[in-house]
Amino acid sequence: MTKEQYARMTGCVRSVTNRLPGGSKILRAPTLVCAAVYCMTLIYLMFTGDMRIIRAVLVPAACFLAATALRPAIGKQRPYDRFDTPPVGSYRPGKGKSMPSRHTASAAAIACAIAYVFPHPAVIACMALLSAVIGSLRVLSGQHDISDVLAALALSLVISLVGYRL
């Protein structure tokens, strides 16, 4: 992506979010929905005494930790730092590295955890869509490149596959 493409993309998203109630904060809504569904699932598992809660906690935690550990090792700059152009919403220049996207890795890991607990096609489709929306918003808001999001998805899917199949 070039600086001009980045500026055009974030400019379009910024103009849309500026017309919405809450402005760019609306971009956080899918992440909050994902977190709420995950919390409700863990509460359900806890109150039903379902031992799947152990994997439903450990596998997403492993995905988050792996993404966190890989970021400084890979050392890729965020697009807004690379292009010296602000993303949509609040940000701090130089705020860490971007690959893989932790938001996307966490959303994909949570989607896999929900699918593990509730393996119904409709639930799986909804959670996959939600994690795709979160990843897309990370790119459209200028926080990450597409490669950051794809790396996060791959990382979470591999860790989840291993974590839930062992």
Image (tube, rainbow, N blue to C red):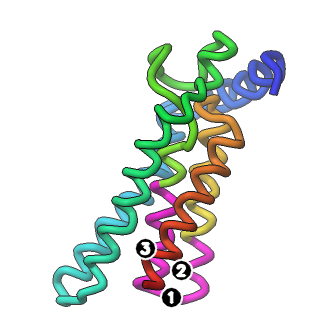
The numbered mark at residue 113 is 3
Taking depth in this image into account, of 157 and 30 the one nearest to the observer is 157
13 shown above or below 85? below
Q: Residue at x 47, y 32 (%)?
A: 72
| The C terminus - image quarter | bottom left
Main secondary structure type of the part rendered in magenta: helix
User: Dot 2, how many residues are within 10 Å of its Cα: few (below 14), some (14-19), or many (20+)?
Assistant: some
Determine the residue positioned at 47% across, 22% down: 90
Q: Is residue 155 magenta?
A: no
Q: Position of residue 84 (x, y in %)?
A: 64, 10
Verify CB contact (< 8 Å) between mark 2 and mark 3: no
Secondary structure at badge 3 equals helix
> Where are the magenta residues, as a range?
106-126
Tell me the CA gap for discs 2 and 1.
7 Å
Circles 2, 1 touching at the beta carbon (< 8 Å): yes
- Using the numbered discs, state the Cα–Cα distance from disc 2 to disc 3 in whole angstroms: 11 Å
- With 69 as the anchor, is 133 left or right in this view? right
At 57% from the left and 67% from the top, the residue drawn is 157
Residue 154 falls left or right of residue 38: right
Q: Residues within 10 Å of mark 3 (few under 14, many from 20)?
A: many
